Amino acid sequence: MIAQTAEVREAHRFDVGALARYMREHVEGFGGSLEVRQFRGGQSNPTYYLSAGGREYVLRRKPPGKLLPSAHAVDREYRVITALGKTGFPVPRTFVLCEDEAVIGTAFYIMDCVHGRVITDPAIPGVTPRERRLIYESLIDVLARLHTADWQALGLADFGRPGNYFARQLHRWTQQYRASETEKIESMERLIPWLPEHIPPGDETALVHGDFRLGNVIIHPTEPRVVAVLDWELSTLGHPLADLAYYCLPYRFTREWEGLADKDLAELGIPTEQEYVAAYCRRAGRAAIADWEFCLAFAMFRLGAIAQGIMGRVVAGTANDPNAQERGRRARPLADSAWALIAARG
């Protein structure tokens, strides 16, 4: 775990002594000299590795500076992880949420440090086909468990607005797209009116992660199973098929985008998209999905709008991510892929 960290960035430093005093008072069993390092990577909420007295913790905080009112909601992350942890769902154990900005400058929470493998390539290199298949089975099992969790019994009835998820998301991401538009993308202009008019009938509500993918889980150090799901910043009450379609997008893309479309799945031990969706339906206790292409097109549209937002920041000169331009360029091919899916339906 320490190998994935670096010295704390200048912009993200805080008073370590103040944090240690707070932890002595609020974290059971805390003691010893506190050392702090920062996890590498582009998390929007700065994430730190803490060690003291032979124990390890992880701290997630809001970034310093002026923020949008609903962004970087570490309190929501803490709430959903804590609720799910009580059911045995694979999330880190939480210790404390601190909303007093006087301690380290912004709100933060502290959770257990879970050791294991963080893998971003869906082809999962370096393991046997059998291990790969079991990891994929564990991932789909975890997603189905999340979507069948009783969010009302977990005290999360006010965690989002139940119902009309696709309609609300389409409105939101269309607005975001228009606000950061840098060029006219013809396929996006077709998607914007088409998607709201073709939302599948019926509605359902589940607890959704919002960014469920291989790179946002920790795999056991030696066993082929998920031990922790991370990065709950986008979690809410929503439509489970939006989560599932987003998670299945690697099947539609090639290795340039860390996809599987040009891989020999049978040789790798990875189920086909059809087999995988069927496995989810069995675990989630639902019938086959009639409007799967809509769900995939929606997921591509949403990612395209996010990519356009990144490109908007590149043009404005406010992008922090060194790969921002490359990620921003994905808006057009994502929209093209979504429209091609729809056009192929006839």
Image (cartoon, helix red, strand yellow):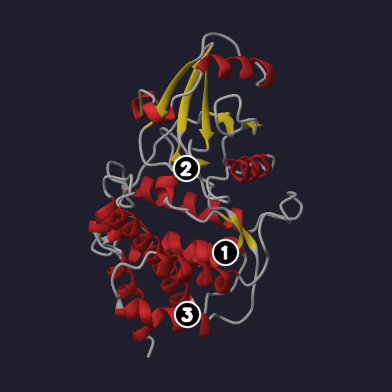
SS for callout 1: helix
Examine the rendering and report whether any part of residue 180 can be seen.
yes
Residue 36 location, quadrant: top left
Spot occupied by residue 239 in the image (x, y as percentages of width and height): 58, 66
- Amino acid residing under circle 3: Leu
Lateral position of residue 73 relative to residue 318, left or right: right
What residue sits 59% from the left and 34% below the top?
A: 107
What mark, if any, has residue 240 been given in the picture?
Answer: 1
Spot occupied by residue 198 in the image (x, y as percentages of width and height): 51, 84
Spot occupied by residue 35 in the image (x, y as percentages of width and height): 46, 15
- Amino acid residing under circle 1: Pro
Which residue carries the number 3 mark? 195
Examine the rendering and report whether any part of residue 272 can be seen.
no
- Nearest the viewer among 84 and 45 is 45
**Mark 2 → mark 3, Cα distance in angstroms:** 36 Å
Vertical placement of 181 versus 317: above or below? Answer: below
Q: Earlier in the sequence, mark 2 or mark 3?
A: 3
- Amino acid residing under circle 2: Arg
SS for callout 3: helix
Q: Are marks 2 and 3 in contact (CB under 8 Å)?
A: no
Tag in front: 2 or 1: 1
In what quadrant of the picture does the N terminus appear? top left
What mark, if any, has residue 225 been given in the picture?
Answer: 2
